[in-house]
Image (cartoon, rainbow, N blue to C red):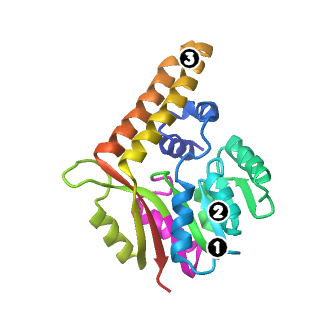
């Protein structure tokens, strides 16, 4: 589990795997942990003709905000998968609350295992989890295998701003990767910077408050919780200055 836990911690901006048991507490005030469900719903409605009964795979679904809202708004069938048991438990509760427990199924699993076996979906979603499945190239290849020949990929990631340094691909590099992998870019939705800053501020206040509670309860781990908060703030700063968050709707060339 070592490598899996490291990827998980990194995907949620944790610097150490020791933080993992505390993530549900730190993130308890947030339902939407990654992608914005509204944007994904808009992309699907605009570009896919028949939305009812679509079969959708939501990888690293977190607490199920995207899965549940897709099922509620579009009447599609969604399989959500995440490795954190508390997140899956919360997602199941939300599905009941929204009256879509017959349309949503959730399970606890490492998505690296999931992509090796899940097949035949109309759409696969990977929302804001970085390189949990490997490099961008490996990620696209794995996602492609889960969908039908004319299926769609929705990926929430980021590209490097012009002139900025860092490990992120440039937009041009992403587009070349899609082309090389036989993937057509149907639409891209860059994040709204003003809106993003507001969401980040709100979310960070919740996280800082919970981190402070944990520091009082576990003073010997205060440095770890401070490290998590600082990583969150650094990531938000990067998103607002060095990289552009983007949701892509991609189509597999049949």
Q: Nearer the viewer, residue 153 or 246?
A: 246
Q: Which residue is mark 2?
A: 70
Label 3 element class: helix
Counting other residues with Cα less than 10 Å from the Cα at mark 2, is it few (<14), some (14-19), or many (20 or more)? many
Query: Which quadrant holds the N terminus?
Result: top right
| Quarter location, residue 5 | top right
Q: Which residue is mark 3?
A: 215
Q: Position of residue 2 (x, y in %)?
A: 56, 42
136 within the magenta span? yes
Q: Which residue is mark 1?
A: 119
Q: Are marks 2 and 3 in contact (CB under 8 Å)?
A: no
Q: Residue reaching furthest left? A: 163
Q: Position of residue 182 (x, y in %)?
A: 41, 79
Q: Nearer the viewer, residue 194 or 79?
A: 194
Task: Work out whether mark 1 precedes mark 2 in sequence or the reverse, and give the earlier one.
Answer: 2
Count of numbered marks: 3
For marks 2 and 3, give the CA distance. Answer: 37 Å
Counting other residues with Cα less than 10 Å from the Cα at mark 3, is it few (<14), some (14-19), or many (20 or more)? some
207 within the magenta span? no
Q: Position of residue 160 (x, y in %)?
A: 29, 54
Residue at x 48% of width, y 77% of height: 251
Label 1 element class: loop
The magenta segment is 131-154
Residue at x 22% of width, y 49% of height: 164
Task: Work out whether mark 2 precedes mark 3 in sequence or the reverse, and give the earlier one.
Answer: 2
């Amino acid at each position: 589990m070592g490598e899996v836990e490291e990827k998980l911690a990194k995907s949620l901006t944790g610097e150490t795997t020791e933080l993992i048991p505390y993530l549900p507490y730190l993130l308890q005030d947030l339902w939407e942990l990654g992608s914005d469900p509204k944007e994904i719903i808009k992309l699907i409605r605009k570009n896919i003709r028949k939305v009812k009964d679509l079969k959708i795979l939501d990888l690293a679904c977190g607490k199920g905000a995207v899965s549940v809202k897709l099922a509620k708004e579009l009447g599609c069938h969604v399989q959500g998968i995440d490795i954190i048991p508390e997140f899956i438990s919360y997602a199941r509760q939300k599905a009941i609350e929204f009256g879509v427990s017959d349309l949503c199924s959730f399970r606890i699993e490492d998505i690296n295992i999931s992509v090796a076996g899940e097949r035949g979906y109309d759409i696969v979603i990977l929302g804001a989890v970085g390189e949990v499945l490997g490099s961008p190239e490996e990620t696209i290849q794995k996602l492609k295998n889960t969908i039908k020949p004319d299926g769609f990929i929705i990926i929430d990631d980021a590209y490097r701003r012009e002139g900025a340094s860092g490990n992120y691909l440039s937009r041009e590099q992403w587009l070349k990767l899609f082309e090389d992998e036989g993937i057509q870019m149907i639409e891209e939705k860059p994040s709204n910077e003003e809106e993003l800053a507001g969401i980040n501020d709100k979310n960070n206040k919740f996280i800082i408050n919970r981190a402070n509670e944990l520091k009082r309860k576990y003073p010997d781990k205060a440095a770890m919780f401070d490290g998590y908060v600082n990583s969150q703030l650094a990531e938000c700063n990067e998103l607002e200055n060095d990289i552009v968050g983007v949701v892509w709707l991609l189509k597999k060339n049949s």
